[in-house]
Image: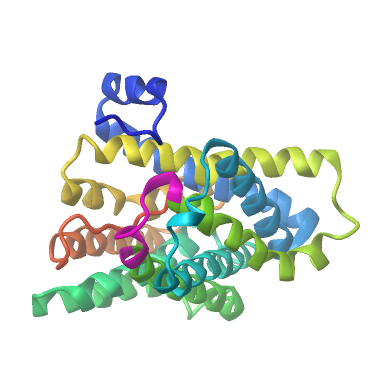
Amino acid sequence: MPDATRPAWLAAVGRAIPPWTLAVAAMLSVQLGSALSVGLIDDVGAGGTAWLRLTAGALIFLLIARPPLRSIRRADLLPLLGLGVATGLMTIAFLAAIERIPLGTAVAIEFLGPLTVAAVHSRRALALVWPIVALAGVVLLTEPWNAGFDPIGIGWAALAAAGWGTYIVLTQRVGDRFTGIRALSITIPIAALTAAIVGIPQAAGHITLEVVAVAIGLGLLLPVIPFALEMLALRRMNPNAFGTLMAIEPAIGLLLGLLVLAQLPSALQILGIALVVIAGAAAQWSGQRTGQRPSRGAQGGT
């Protein structure tokens, strides 16, 4: 049966382009959106940026999909609310992190969240090694022995990691009842309302037409475009292969941090990113639940 949530032109694009390129494009969109958010953070703060970006994403999803409110059961309320709140808090935490530390470092630390979830859910004892390997990579990235070490920025990134791990767990529950844009049309508005608690006071007095236009553009870069590309890629890729490919996202974050923000990594930091990528790919293959991956397209956050 045709997918009512997927336009015909989107399906045609998906058939014409190799699926791995769609996955890579989704990661590029996520990290480009994160890199470009730094400029907006300077104007309205991390909370204001999270609120504006999530609000833009929520409005876009509400325009293209009708929330399945009549399908919501009482047992669905807490998982949906929890997923929306986790998304909003994760977004604020990650943006607060990249305000203080390099993008690649923040992405690598945040990646510890889904890595830990994958290890805990794995049937193999060896899987517990991969978060440790990734943590070693993070130590090389953050270089705590240097004077430039920023514990506050690291703390924000660690909070984002906890949020992403929570997001993965709740997505498993919500995904059994709601899929695709139908889920996002519920959870992203909740995330936007969550971010509004911090975001509105930060952004008050600083909102201009230019700021709104930038926020809409960032909302398209994350979550709308990545979600569409991931959805297309997953229809034509083995889930384990997709998840393994997604493990290179910290490296893409490092690259865009260099190209967009001029954040030049040291040799040790490059080695640290390599360890995180290796650990992410290995954890994906040792995960218990087939097809589970550290998806980012739905979160609308980092």
Pinpoint residue 188: horizontal percent, then vertical percent. Answer: 55, 55
**Viewer-proximal residue, 278 or 18?**
18
Q: Is residue 183 above or below residue 61?
A: below
Q: In this figure, what is the number of numbered marks?
A: 0
Task: Give percent across and percent down for residue 88.
Answer: 58, 65
| Span shown in magenta | 172-182
| Res 230 → quadrant | top left
**What is the x, y in percent for residue 60?**
60, 40
Q: Is residue 209 shown in magenta?
A: no
List the single residue furthest toward the front. 70
Q: Is residue 160 visible from the viewing direction of this image? A: yes
User: Going 48% across and 79% down the picture, which residue do you hit?
Assistant: 144
- Image location (x, y in percent) of residue 108: 41, 63
How was this image coloured? rainbow
Residue 247's image quarter? bottom left
Instruction: State yes or no: residue 180 in magenta.
Output: yes
